[in-house]
Amino acid sequence: MKENIRDRSKPGTWVAIPLPKGGYALGLVARRAESRRQLRRTFIYIFGPRAQSPEELALHLNRGVNESIRFGFTMDPAILEGRWPIVGRIQPFIPDDWPVPLVKSGPIGGGPDFMRRRELYELGDDLEGKRVFAERIVDDPKDYANRGTHGYISFEEFAERQIEEKPLLSDL
């Protein structure tokens, strides 16, 4: 049976994210908006270290959410068009095991804590609905997802910055 092209980016899919300086990062599609638009917003966990090939990543799929080095939003054409090779799937995928962290806005308000003051909100599984929390002082912004969505090239650069100092998988 032929795979539906939309199934390529379904939650639970492990992908090899090509990095600008060579090699690949491992990514897990944790959520995908189910809108009728052609391009769908996708939430991905990123894992290091850098691998030389997608085949090398396929040997390291026994990862958990706490092992991710970062996460973020992108659109799914890189997966649908094969730019990001699929290296495996979690069967069955349980969304509660891979939660979407709180999302932060850009800096808001004024005063001495201006750059750290953010609005935090929670997205639904469809990545559309949100429930806003009170504004907070955010000491470590890496604990939260940015509300913006990267294009796939920008997401590859983002992943590169997250694992730049990590060794190669083959060196471990």
Image (cartoon, rainbow, N blue to C red):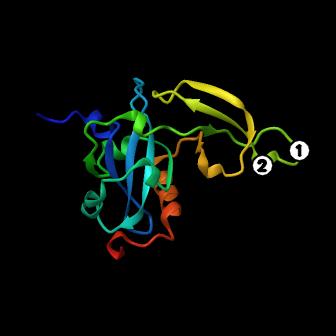
The number of numbered badges drawn on the structure is: 2
34 and 27: which is toward the camera:
27
* Three-letter amino acid code at the position of disc 1: Gly
Q: Secondary structure at mark 1?
A: loop
153 and 102: which is toward the camera:
102
Label 2 Cα neighbours within 10 Å, binned few <14 / some 14-19 / many ≥20: some
Indicate the position of residue 130 as horizontal and vertical percent values. Answer: 58, 26
Q: Secondary structure at mark 2?
A: helix
Indicate the position of residue 149 as horizontal and vertical percent values. Answer: 53, 41
* Three-letter amino acid code at the position of disc 2: Met
Q: Is residue 37 left or right of residue 128?
A: left
169 w.r.t. 67: above or below:
below
65 and 111: which is toward the camera:
65
- Residue that numbered label 2 is attached to: 115
Residue drawn at x 40%, y 38% is 97
- Residue that numbered label 1 is attached to: 111
Residue drawn at x 25%, y 36% is 5
Residue drawn at x 31%, y 53% is 62
110 w.r.t. 160: above or below:
above
